[in-house]
Amino acid sequence: MSGNIIILMLGISTFLGAAGLAALLWGVKTGQFDDHSKFIDAARFDNEEDLRDAAMMEEKKKAREKKRKEEKKKHYMPVD
């Protein structure tokens, strides 16, 4: 490749990176990523049934992890 093409590619990529960084900083500064109503909406729209389902899923996950650990202990063989 020609040296001019490499310089052009470096210049364009640097410009695009700087533009992306500027857009990110602008978004953070103006509060584009803030969600003040997230937790309020979660509390407002969650009902008792959803909470029970979440607790049941968490218990199942813990039971699977416990079972998996017991399976590993059963099949443990020390290295010769």
Image (cartoon, rainbow, N blue to C red):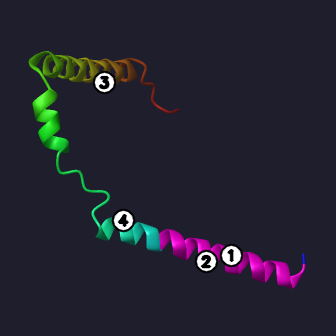
Instruction: Tell us which disc is closer to us: 3 or 1.
Output: 1
Q: Earlier in the sequence, mark 3 or mark 1?
A: 1
Crowding at mark 1 (Cα within 10 Å: few <14, some 14-19, many 20+): few
Q: Give the CA separation, mark 1 to mark 2.
A: 5 Å
- Front one among 72 and 52: 52
Magenta region, mostly helix, strand or loop? helix
Q: Earlier in the sequence, mark 4 or mark 1?
A: 1
Mark 2 and mark 1 in contact (Cβ < 8 Å)? yes
Residue 37 image point, x, y percent: 17, 45
Residue 63 image point, x, y percent: 25, 18
Crowding at mark 3 (Cα within 10 Å: few <14, some 14-19, many 20+): few
Label 1, on which residue?
A: 12
Label 3, on which residue?
A: 65
Q: Horizontal placement of 35 versus 4: left or right?
A: left
* Callout 2 amino acid: Phe
Q: How many marks?
A: 4
Q: Give the CA separation, mark 3 to mark 2.
A: 49 Å
Q: Horizontal placement of 10 versus 44: left or right?
A: right
SS of the residue under disc 2:
helix
Label 4, on which residue?
A: 27
Q: Give the CA separation, mark 3 to mark 1.
A: 50 Å
Q: Which residues make up the magenta segment? A: 2-21
Asked if residue 35 lies in the magenta stretch, the reply is no
Instruction: Tell us which disc is closer to us: 3 or 4.
Output: 4
Residue 23 image point, x, y percent: 45, 68
Q: Horizontal placement of 13 versus 31: left or right?
A: right
Q: Give the CA separation, mark 4 to mark 2.
A: 18 Å
- Front one among 16 and 52: 16
Crowding at mark 4 (Cα within 10 Å: few <14, some 14-19, many 20+): few
Q: Give the CA separation, mark 3 to mark 4.
A: 40 Å
Q: Residue at x 90, y 75 (%)?
A: 1
